[in-house]
Structures are given as structure tokens and as C-alpha cells.
Image (tube, helix red, strand yellow):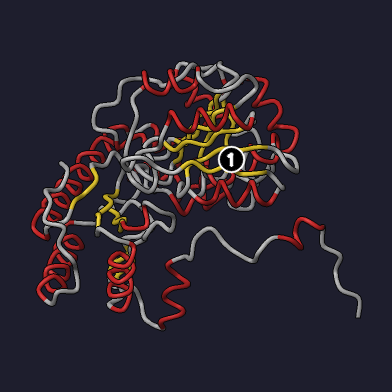
């Protein structure tokens, strides 16, 4: 029997996925998760307006979603003070990252990112044969100086930066980002992943000019808007980049529910403000928990907090112990971040249960104490 003829690139790639999903963990264990705190989903749900709009949209589920996402782009343009030509809508940032790579990366194209940053970007780059150049984190932050130096050294076509960062939750202000952008080589495009931007405690305005052809900003409705299952996000970019996307994007890839839900959520800013306040309260709760355990928490501008276990071995051990108790959190795989455990802000009840469990593990000496004060 003849076998399918894959491309040489596909044959060379390992069979990997960016993340093991929580559903797979449940299938493997045969038990439901007790606490689902590893995917950075919003435990506070979607806006009631969004839920109502999506329920109404079920009456039209036999229709395709608008391939131009016209009403959503119109609303986003009004909110951000942009032209609609600056906006491209996709089925979440993961989809948009794939679109960027498809548009700009060829075999051997040099791309720069941080070692241990959001792995889906790497997954797309590898899938199109790009050459990834990694820069380690420094003091639990993306090392902007080293990223710019690497981009200059390899003449990178793309640089990826999540801000706020995933998995550390750290954040750079607009002035730092503008300085960083100016240090990148000519013809280099900065991919600025702002999935967690709504959780920044004191934002200082747009980091970049939307018309600047050197940068693409990406936002999502998966996090603060609580619509991860609807798969919808958008990119802010120069019109010529949006036009290029239109040449190759999946024009019917954004579903009807995502479009109407996102539009309704934008019309409920009070709900997002409430979510922001609830997340900040949860972050403070985790900082307090870290102090109680003698651990360090990295101050976060996202809806999660990274706890420093002091070593890769300690972090792996705790991850295993928690999974045995059906508690799902994540651990970054690359050094120096592999000593961290990243925990999504849960409901008050979930945080109480987690606090009780971690104290029990600490009493059983299953959590090492660093005897340091947590960040706040």
C-alpha cells in the first residue's frame, strides 16, 4: 500500500503539540480535575450581554459568520480610534500568530523570541521552516536588550514579545516598548502579543502607533472577556499588513457566536472592569499565600501568578504532587523559568481550597520553602 507523500519539512518535525490540554489530563487519569488552574481561562465567565447575544445567535447558526467581521471591526475601530483598515479578526491569537508566520516566514527565515515564551508561536514558525533564535529571560523578564541584539545579529524578520508576559506575568510600559522597537533592525516586524493587557493595573496608553508597519499588536476575547471557547481575537496593524493577511487568511474561520459575543462584550465595559478588580484581588490572595509558604511570587500583570519553587526539581515535584490530587497548574519547561509554577486566578472558593491543600503539602514537607518575601 502506498503511503502519503508528506513534505520534507513535515517529515522532519517531531509529533508534538504546544500544550497538553486539561481534557487530555482527565482522560489519562480517568478522573475529573478538582481544580482547573492551568489554562488561564477566566473563572468569572463572559459578560451577561455576550451570553445573551450568543444565545440569540443560535437561531442563525445555519448562517456563516460575516467573513469581513464588519460590525466587530467597526466597533473596535471606534474604541481604539483607528480605521477599520487597521484591523484583522481571527479565531483567537493562536490563529493570528499562524497567519503572521504564513505571511512572513519561509524556510530559513530568522525569527527571534524568548526561551520559554508562549510556545504556540514557536510551533507555527517550525511548521513553516523558520529558524528560531532564542534569548533567555533575565530576572524573570523578557530581556529586551538581548532580544534587540539578537535580532540585529541574525537580521530577524520577526520578533515575538508577549506583554504582559506569559508565563511570568511581567510587563513593560509604553516607553520601554518604543525604545525596544527603535532598536530592531530595518525590515523586522515586532509581534506584540497583548492577550493579558486588560489585567494591567496601571496601563499607560497605547505602546505603539497602529499605523507603524514595524509592529502588529494582538488582542483576544479569551481572557478578560471570558470567551476562550468562542475563539476570537484581533490584530492591529498597518493597512498594508491587513491587506496581506486578506490574501491568505481563512475568510470563514471566525464563527458567528464569536463575532456577536465579542461585539456585545465590548458594549459592557463595566463587566470587564469588574473582572479586572476580581483578578487583582485574586493576585493579592496568591501573593499572601506565597508569603505564608515562604515562597516568592512574581508580581503579575496577568490573570495568573507564577510561584518560585527555587529549582526545577522542586517545581516538577510539586506539579506531579498536585496532578496526583487532580489539581491542574502549569510549569514552564525552559530554564531559568522551569523552577516556576504558574497558577491561574481562581474563584474565591477555588483559592481557598488551593490554600488549604498547599499548606497541607507544606506541613508534609512536600513544598520547599525559599524563606523569601513574595512580591506584591
Q: Is residue 50 left or right of residue 153?
A: left
Q: Quadrant of residue 87?
A: top right
Give the quadrant of the C terminus.
top left
Name above or below for residue 332 compared with residue 235.
Answer: below
Q: Is residue 118 above or below residue 354?
A: above
Q: Choose between 263 and 360: the one closer to the eye.
A: 360
Hey, which residue is sitting farthest right in the picture?
2
Q: Residue at x 40, y 56 (%)?
A: 332
Vertical side of 57 occupied by 341: above or below: below
The percent coordinates of residue 300 (x first, y second) are 26, 42
Q: Which residue is mark 1?
A: 96
User: Whole-percent x and y of residue 224?
Assistant: 34, 42
Give the secondary structure at mark 1.
helix
- Left or right? Give the position of 362 relative to 268: left
Residue at screen point 31% across, 55% down: 342
Give the image location of residue 274, x and y in percent: 23, 39
Name the outermost residue toward the bottom: 30
63 to 100, vertically: above or below = below
- Residue 191 percent location from the top left of the image: 54, 32
- Looking at the rendered image, the quarter that the N terminus falls into is bottom right
Between 123 and 356, which is closer to the camera in this rendering?
A: 123
Numbered disc total: 1
Judging depth in this view, the residue of 182 and 53 nearest the camera is 182
For the point 43% across and 18% down, which residue is it? 179
Q: Residue at horizontal 64%, vertical 28%?
A: 155
Q: Is residue 312 left or right of residue 361?
A: right
**Left or right position of 133 against 346:** right
Label 1 neighbourhood size at 10 Å, few (<14), some (14-19), many (20+)?
Answer: many
Amino acid at each position: 500500500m502506498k503511503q502519503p507523500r508528506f513534505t520534507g519539512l513535515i517529515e522532519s518535525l517531531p509529533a508534538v503539540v504546544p500544550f497538553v490540554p486539561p481534557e487530555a489530563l482527565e482522560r489519562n487519569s480517568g478522573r475529573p480535575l478538582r481544580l482547573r488552574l492551568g489554562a488561564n481561562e477566566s473563572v468569572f465567565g463572559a459578560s451577561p450581554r455576550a451570553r445573551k447575544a450568543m444565545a440569540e445567535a443560535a437561531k442563525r447558526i445555519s448562517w456563516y459568520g460575516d467573513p469581513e467581521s464588519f460590525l466587530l471591526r467597526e466597533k473596535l475601530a471606534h474604541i481604539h480610534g483607528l480605521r477599520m483598515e487597521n484591523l484583522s479578526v481571527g479565531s483567537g491569537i493562536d490563529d493570528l500568530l499562524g497567519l503572521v508566520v504564513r505571511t512572513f516566514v519561509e524556510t530559513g527565515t530568522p525569527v527571534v523570541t524568548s526561551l520559554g515564551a508562549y510556545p504556540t508561536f514557536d510551533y507555527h514558525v517550525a511548521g513553516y521552516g523558520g529558524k528560531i533564535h532564542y534569548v533567555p529571560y533575565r530576572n524573570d523578564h523578557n530581556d529586551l536588550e538581548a532580544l534587540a541584539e539578537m535580532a540585529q545579529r541574525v537580521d530577524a524578520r520577526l520578533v515575538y514579545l508577549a506583554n504582559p508576559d506569559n508565563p511570568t506575568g511581567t510587563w513593560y510600559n509604553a516607553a520601554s516598548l518604543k525604545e525596544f522597537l527603535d532598536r530592531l533592525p530595518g525590515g523586522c516586524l515586532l509581534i506584540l502579543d497583548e492577550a493579558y493587557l486588560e489585567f494591567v493595573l496601571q496601563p499607560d496608553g497605547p505602546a505603539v502607533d497602529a499605523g507603524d508597519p514595524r509592529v502588529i499588536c494582538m488582542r483576544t476575547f479569551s481572557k478578560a472577556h471570558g470567551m476562550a471557547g468562542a475563539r476570537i481575537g484581533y490584530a492591529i496593524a498597518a493597512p498594508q499588513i491587513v491587506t496581506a493577511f486578506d490574501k491568505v487568511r481563512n475568510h470563514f474561520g471566525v464563527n458567528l457566536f464569536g463575532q456577536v459575543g465579542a461585539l456585545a462584550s465590548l458594549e459592557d465595559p463595566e463587566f470587564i472592569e469588574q473582572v479586572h478588580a476580581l483578578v487583582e484581588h485574586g493576585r493579592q490572595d496568591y501573593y499572601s499565600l506565597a508569603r505564608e509558604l515562604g515562597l516568592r511570587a512574581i508580581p503579575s500583570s496577568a490573570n495568573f501568578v507564577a510561584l518560585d519553587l527555587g529549582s526545577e526539581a522542586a517545581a516538577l515535584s510539586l506539579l506531579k504532587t498536585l496532578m496526583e490530587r487532580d489539581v491542574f497548574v502549569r510549569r514552564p519547561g525552559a530554564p531559568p523559568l522551569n523552577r516556576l509554577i504558574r497558577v491561574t486566578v481562581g474563584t474565591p472558593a477555588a483559592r481557598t481550597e488551593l490554600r488549604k491543600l498547599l499548606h497541607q503539602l507544606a506541613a508534609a514537607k512536600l513544598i520547599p520553602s525559599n524563606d523569601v518575601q513574595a512580591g506584591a
